Image: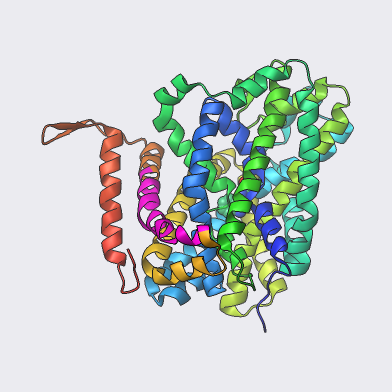
Amino acid sequence: MTRESWQTRIGFILAAVGSAVGLGNLWRFPWMTSENGGAAFLLVYLGIVLAVGVPGLLAEFVIGRRSRRNPVGALSDLSDSKGWTAFGHVFVVTAVVLLSFYSVVGGWILRYVAASATGAYFADPGAYFAGIDYGIEAVAFHLAFLGATAAIVLRGVRRGIESATKLMMPAILVLLVGLAAWGLSLDGAGAGVDFFLTPDFGYLRANFLDILPAAAGQALFTLSLGAGTMVTYASYLGEDRSLVADGTAIATLNTVVGVLAGVVVFPILFALGAGAGAGGPGALFVSLAGAFAALPYGQVVGVAFFGVVALAALSSSISMLEIPVSFLVDEYGVSRPTATASFVGVFAVTGSVCALYPNVFSFVAGTLVDLLLTGGLVGFLLFAGWVMGRGALDEYRRGAGGLARSLATPWLYAVGVVIPVFLVFTFVSGVAAALGVTVEPLSVLGVTLDQTRVFAVVSVALAVVAFLGLRRPDSVL
Ligand code: TRP
């Protein structure tokens, strides 16, 4: 059986943008921004997308296109090593973890499309959300969302994913631009725009080290990095166009949608006097939904807004389901329908657990996802930099233009050395925070090291050990 592939290059780009654009842009991004100082956060986040996101995206693309395999098969084929094959299975776990909580939020969104039409939450948005967020109805809506996801993946790469995202992406953009124009026209919208787009440099300087990991986590999540989604999508590329051009286009479009989402959400929140503080995880469902209730044509705006979010969530969830499906199809020769059905069975259960137990949901959606994605991306980066080495450079250069080619070697250094050290640092800090570990200042050779510096030293040491362990004849570094 020949392996599936994208019909067109633009089909691949839109599918990848569809994966990237999702709840990360519309729900998580405004929430993170409001908790981390507004425009100050935006600035750091944009820097990380450019410095970490784009090179990371290219690493996943290079691995996927070179191997033409799912993440497990890719690491296995390109390394011929049992260790990497075993590590590859982590991505199947990551996919399960991701879609389990994502599908629950997707279910809430589906419900809110309907509830906006009838105005069900208009009287008391807070109480309405608290009544539906977890429980048996949340399970039902999660299953509905999962069903929609499966229906697309079942149809395959071209007839399913590619044709669906080709319709969804333009629809999302048009609706968002319309909503942003409407939001900006509200009285008092200016304060929201200010909060979102005018950085407070004093805040930035004082909180830089707290903003950094939050911005890094957000950048990975929104670009769908660290789970093997982008490896999988690039593995369906039949032609040798420039991965650099495609990756840049994908990251840019994703950023545009994130910024547009902020321009929709913050003016509406500020115009209604809710302020940024109302921007937590329930922001979409409580503050923003409450704003729709108070505004003229609220029902129409509500359906349009939650409709956009539903489309965006669906075009991402299919990319999560595609990871384990491609794994079963490639590695075990299972048919696509059987593979899809098997994993839908798994997700039906794991997602229901998230829909029933708020504590499980929070842990999975927060700490667990952050750590798995960071660790997963470090794995891909080290793999491209040290195991593939020369092969990664060749693949990067295939189809690339002059400017991109001249950046090939710097890219390999970034991917093999600089970015892993940075991500290991955020990983170590994240684990310490999750376990509640704090480190007393240490004095070494007369230099006092505070916790941040201790973690930095530990990260560099860990990275160096990894580099030495991974060196192979093909490593250019
Ligand atoms: N990027 C998507 C969003 O912003 C979520 C997503 C899809 C994802 N596939 C992923 C996140 C893989 C991490 C890894 O909503």
Does the image show residue 447?
yes
Q: Examine the structure image and report whether residue 170 is included in the region drawn in magenta.
A: no
Give the magenta part as a residue range: 403-425
Left/right of residue 384 with respect to residue 102 in the rendered view: left
Q: Is residue 156 visible?
A: no
Q: Nearer the viewer, residue 263 or 104?
A: 263
Q: Residue extending furthest left?
A: 445
Residue for point 70% across, 56% down: 14
Quadrant the N terminus occupies: bottom right
Residue placed at 52% from the left, 74% from the top?
A: 67
Quarter of the image where one finds residue 450: top left
Q: How many labels does the image show?
A: 0
Q: Position of residue 73 (x, y in %)?
A: 51, 73
Residue 388, above or below 103:
below
Residue furthest front in the image: 402
| Residue 69 in picture, x, y percent from top left | 56, 73
Q: Which residue is drawn at 47% across and 22% down?
A: 201
The extreme bottom residue here reads: 1
Residue 409 position by quadrant = bottom left
Vertical side of 53 occupied by 92: above or below: below
Q: In this view, does 117 lie to the left or right of 288?
A: right
Quadrant of the drawing holding the C terminus: bottom left
The main secondary structure of the magenta stretch is helix
Query: What x and y, as percent, mark residue 391?
Result: 44, 72
User: Residue at left 62%, top 21%?
Assistant: 194
